[in-house]
Image: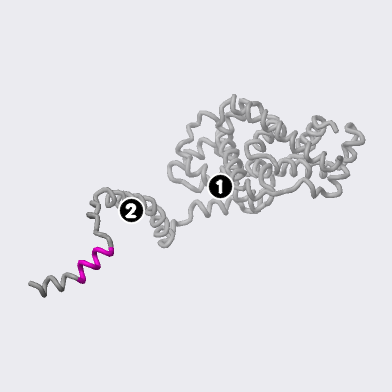
Amino acid sequence: MEPSDTELIAAVRQGDVQQFETLITRYQPRVFATARRYARREDEVQDIVQEVFIKAFQKLDSFRAEAPFEHWLMRMAVRTCYDFLRSHQRNRETTLTDLSDPEVDWLERFAAGPEDNSKNTDAARALVERVMAQLSPEARLVITLLEIEDRSVKEIARLTGWSVPLVKVRAFRARAQMKKILETLTREKYL
Amino acid sequence: MDLEKLQQKLMAAARATPPGDQVPYAFEKRIMARLTAPLTVDVWAVWGRWLWRAVAPCMSVMAALGVWVLATTHAEPESPNLEQAIENTLLSSDDVAGE
């Protein structure tokens, strides 16, 4: 039988550092999936994941076991991703004008019939990535958690460390920002 | 174009294709290697860091000294004008000779 998280954490705290490897193996798929929502390049994703686990190891003494280890770790993962977005804010200069052919096709099919463009989800995903890259770090984080991961405002507050009213304000601003970006995108292409 | 609908469609597309959770081979070993690596100290980096930290206090001390010097220096008594000074210098030899 595999040792529980609590047992592993206790062992690490007592100096058996190698037990932390089991914790990494157990949770790294989830942390990788989270990091891939915010970073595009695989080397950036790996850097984020590495940072999350190093932080977790260094702060393991502050883990109080009031919530499952996974929640504590995911909170750290989300905050590390947010820090990553903030530090790479200026490097992300994707333009809305240079859409690829499949993206233009997807938009044209949407313009012709909004109900009928279920095909080519890759193009839609590329468009989402393009639009998300234009958002501010706060907006991107809140849209990802709220709209894509379908989390509640309370959950987002817990994950980010923001207050509930702040999450609501940021969600409102993020939606407005996204609408503006979509407006620019469609105006450039269709007017 | 219905932007609300467009936004919903794009979000639905993002939801439909969640990112993969695959992990590079032996990634946990890489992290463990980082965690258990002996701590090596880069002397030059430490020296450089301390130098940078010293910049602000040094500048503050310099500014404080500058203010103190300006505040404590007494203004020189007003010197006679240049014309008068030259005349005094030239005629001083005559005064000495006359005595």
Q: Crowdedness of circle 2 by 10 Å Cα count: few (<14), some, many (20+)?
A: few
Q: Is residue B10 left or right of residue A154?
A: right
Label 1, label 2: how many angstroms apart (C-alpha)?
A: 41 Å
List the single residue furthest toward the front.
B98
Amino acid carrying label 1: it is Glu
Expressed as whole percent of the image width and height from the top left, the position of residue B15 reads 76, 35
Expressed as whole percent of the image width and height from the top left, the position of residue A113 reads 91, 34
> Residues at badges 1 and 2 in contact (C-beta under 8 Å)?
no
The magenta segment: B82-90
Quadrant location of the C terminus of chain A in the rendered image:
top right
Name the chain letter of the residue that bears numbered label 2: B
Disc 2 element: helix
- Write down the residue under mark 2: B62
Q: Is residue A53 left or right of residue B92?
A: right
Disc 1 element: helix
Of residues B12 and A131, the one drawn nearer to the viewer in this rendering: A131
Quadrant location of the N terminus of chain A in the rendered image:
top right
Asked whether residue A74 is drawn in magenta, I would say: no
Q: Is residue B78 left or right of residue B13?
A: left
Expressed as whole percent of the image width and height from the top left, the position of residue A158 reads 57, 29
Mark in front: 1 vs 2: 2
Mark 1 vs mark 2: same chain?
A: no
List the single residue furthest toward the left.
B99
Q: Residue at x 78, y 43 (%)?
A: A127
Expressed as whole percent of the image width and height from the top left, the position of residue B51 reads 39, 57
Q: Residue at x 50, y 39 (%)?
A: A9
For residue A51, the mark is 1
